[in-house]
Image (spheres, helix red, strand yellow):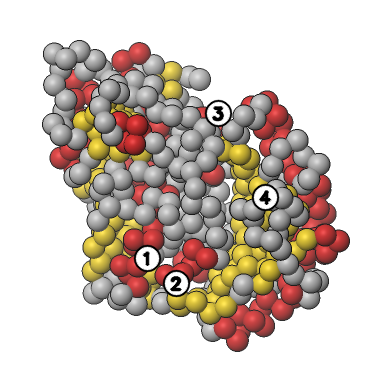
Amino acid sequence: MSDDHPAPVPGHALRPEDDGYDDACSGYQIAFRHRPELAVAATGPEDMRAAVEYATANGLPVGVQATGHGSPGPLEGGVLISTRRMDGVRIDPGARSAWVAAGARWQQVIDAAAAHGLAPLSGSFPHVGAVGYTLGGGMGLLGRRYGYAADHVRRIDIVTADARLRSVTAHSDPDLFWALRGGGRGFGVVTGMEIGLVPLTRIYGGALSFTGDVMDDALEAYAAWTATVPDELTSSLSMVALPDLPVVPPPMRGRHVATVAVSYIGDAGEGERLVAPLRAAGPRLRDTLRDMPFTESGDIHAEPEQPHAYAGDNALLDGVDGAELSAIRRLSGPEAPLMCVVGLRHLGGAFARPPEAANAVPHRSAQFGLGVLSPVDGADPATVRGLHGRVLATVAGRTVGRSVNFAFGAGRAADPTGLHPAGDLSRLTGLRERLDPRGVFAHARPGTRPGPGGAGVSP
């Protein structure tokens, strides 16, 4: 970038030699580092609009990052817009809605809504950016009762490749509104969104952890149990061989652990009755189930806040049984060539029902979502791909597709295979090409990478 081209947003635009540049480029995913020619620490929609205008005028690609949890890969050159400083949240209790700025995290929305007896359709990790999570669909803690987070979006404000700020609703632009809710990234830079909230202050939730000889019994019990629970109960199963390190709680340290996480919209007494079949599977390493305020819902999964390097993939399934889960346990356990965190999310219920205004969330027939994730700091990429491929091959006959929100790392996030049915994929591709013919946002599109001048090219 020549000095003849002034920064688009004076005071908020950083070049590699500037203080604050590395911080603006960093995120939760540290397997790779963005190295843009210019990093824009946006403080409002006009900063974002100016950054896009500058990029298009100079033939540069644009990347966007809030927390960086689901980054599609490194942006080399071009303009990176960091939205983390745009973290405002406004609640309209009468409309049961929230206005969420581009960089806000779910915990901020949860806390603001709780003051009015309301809750959002947030996920298992409350420190994830709300906007990125929702653009990919959003499988939340309350999903079997209320559906995907994307189903509850009422309006999205976005800067498109023509540097125009648009307010998108089901009436103003039905095609783009459809695509933005579940179609993933690559349509522009979202400056904020209006979402619906649900009346909720407390849930019954927590986790049950099993190890040793009882693991297969617990896996069999979970697979059978999911067919019996009401839509008010959303749950997941995880499996991981934990290291023998001080950072791991003593009861779990050095053990292969299966954990069932539960969130139930109802009173604790009924919750206790519903989870009794799981407790009957055998002794637990940990049992944290309790009545809790929704503001503490992050305790259910207790996911790590420390940034790290990871890669992962997923499959959406039409079913699963205990034998398949036991096979996955053996493949991903202590004998695996590297740590592999397996997560199985129970879908169905409202996840399967289309919203009032149609959106691009795919594969609603899926009954489960299976994810695999591994730390990759120093790991051989071929080993990671091989392990994940073997695990997912176990359920190949059950697979109906993939979820964009659980394809992690530059390789898998760039692969569009299975993310959308052919008709939807064609519609999404056509809309991206119409809105962004020069590929300004190609960095974020599945199946493309920014080439010279920002044009999208096949990987």
Residue position marked by numbered label 2 in the rendering? 294
C-alpha span from label 4 to label 1: 32 Å
Where residue 260 appears, as percent x and y from the top left, is: 66, 64
Quadrant where the N terminus sits is: top left
Point out the tag, 4 or 1, that comes first from the N-terminus.
Answer: 1
Residue position marked by numbered label 1 in the rendering? 110
Which quadrant holds residue 71?
top left
The amino acid sitting under disc 3 is Gly
Left or right of residue 325: residue 249 = left
| Nearest to the observer: residue 210 or residue 139 | 210
Residue position marked by numbered label 3 in the rendering? 411
Residue position marked by numbered label 4 in the rendering? 245
The amino acid sitting under disc 4 is Leu
Q: Nearer the viewer's eye, disc 4 or disc 2?
A: 4
What is the secondary structure assignment of the residue under circle 3? helix
What is the secondary structure assignment of the residue under circle 4? loop
Q: Residue at x 77, y 47 (%)?
A: 333
| Nearest to the observer: residue 97 or residue 248 | 248
C-alpha span from label 1 to label 3: 33 Å
Q: Residue at x 61, y 53 (%)?
A: 247
C-alpha span from label 1 to label 2: 8 Å
Numbered-mark total: 4
